[in-house]
Image (tube, rainbow, N blue to C red):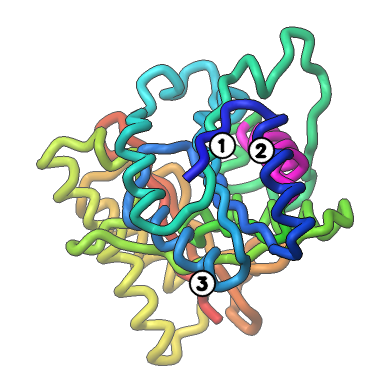
């Protein structure tokens, strides 16, 4: 497996693979890899011949009071996960490589990013769109895989690729949960044992709302109420609970099209997100 720390290293590999007629899949990550990330690598293998995983804690998607400095990092662990899942190369750049001192060019998505996480994290998706554009350009990938756990991010990136006519396919991969139901996240490491148990109220609410939907409930407020009350029972501090049109990420009152039930909540100082796609 190749460890690439410069743009030139990645480009040389990708160019050589393309000359061999190989397709390239990219799995963008911020490292501290878990089984959810591993599932993205496995799915990437179904869509491409060669797989690159980027490991980069992107500073431009963190607000001034967020957890950039304490975000978990363990490259040796990340390397082991990638090797176990047949990854061909890791791109492991520094912030200085990705952002020149006078960096001043940004990529904005101005519709899907306005609500949900975009309200409480106003610069977040500008950073996400910008770094993903850079990673697509650097890796020369044909396919990129994003998890549905970060649903808003995945839908924004898919829209950005469509709108800017980028020559790659975006694949959305299923959300992966821990054995107890908590959505897998690198930030789960922050939770105390007691906070972890209370945080299960999110997935319990998601499952209960999904069951009610499968039983025929189509009223958005009724489904949001199930999730809200579950999180409140777990003493979580709710950032949002929303039910949105999947295509527009605008609120709907009755589910008569593909929808997304999503939430963000704090347990202690840790902000967790979760969702279910209602097809």
The residue that mark 1 highlights is 91
Q: Quadrant of the C terminus?
A: bottom right
Q: Are marks 1 and 2 in contact (CB under 8 Å)?
A: yes
Magenta region, residue range? 124-140
Residue 270 lies left or right of residue 246; in this view the side is: left
The image position of residue 89, as x and y in percent, is 53, 45
- First along the sequence among labels 3 and 1: 1
Query: Residue placed at 65% from the left, 81% from the top?
Result: 257
Residue 50, can we see it? yes
Looking at the image, the residue that sits furthest to the top is 101
Between marks 2 and 3 in the image, the one whose residue lies nearer the viewer: 2
Query: Measured along the vertical axis of the image, is residue 46 above or below residue 102?
Result: below
Q: At numbered mark 2, what does the secondary structure look like: helix, strand or loop?
A: helix
Tag 3 residue: 277
Please indicate, yes or no, whether residue 129 appears anywhere in the rendered image. Answer: no
The residue singled out by tag 2 in the image is 10
Q: Residues within 10 Å of mark 2 (few under 14, many from 20)?
A: many
């Amino acid at each position: 497996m190749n460890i690439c720390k410069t743009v030139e290293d990645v480009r040389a590999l990708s160019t050589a693979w393309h000359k061999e007629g190989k397709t390239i899949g990219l799995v963008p990550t911020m490292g501290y890899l878990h089984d959810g990330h591993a599932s993205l690598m496995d799915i990437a293998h179904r869509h491409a011949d060669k797989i690159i995983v980027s490991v980069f804690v992107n500073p431009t998607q963190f607000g001034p009071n967020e957890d950039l400095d304490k975000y978990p990092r363990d490259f040796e662990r990340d390397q082991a996960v990638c090797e176990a899942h047949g990854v061909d190369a890791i791109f492991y750049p520094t912030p200085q490589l990705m952002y020149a001192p006078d960096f001043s060019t940004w990529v904005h998505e101005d519709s899907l990013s306005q609500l949900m996480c975009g309200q409480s994290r106003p610069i977040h998706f500008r950073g996400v769109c910008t770094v993903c554009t850079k990673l697509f350009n650097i890796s020369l990938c044909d396919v990129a895989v994003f998890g549905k756990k970060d649903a808003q991010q995945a839908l924004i990136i898919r829209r950005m690729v469509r709108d800017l006519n980028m020559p790659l396919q975006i694949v959305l991969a299923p959300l992966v949960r821990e054995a107890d139901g908590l959505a897998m996240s690198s930030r789960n490491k922050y939770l105390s044992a007691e906070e972890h148990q209370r945080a299960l109220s999110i997935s319990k609410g998601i499952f209960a709302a999904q069951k009610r939907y499968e039983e025929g409930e189509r009223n958005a407020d009724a489904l949001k109420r199930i999730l809200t009350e579950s999180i409140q029972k777990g003493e979580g501090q709710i950032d949002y609970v929303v039910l949105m049109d999947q295509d527009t990420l605008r609120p709907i009152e009755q589910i008569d099209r593909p929808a997304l039930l999503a939430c963000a909540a704090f347990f202690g100082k840790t902000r967790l997100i979760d969702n279910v796609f209602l097809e």
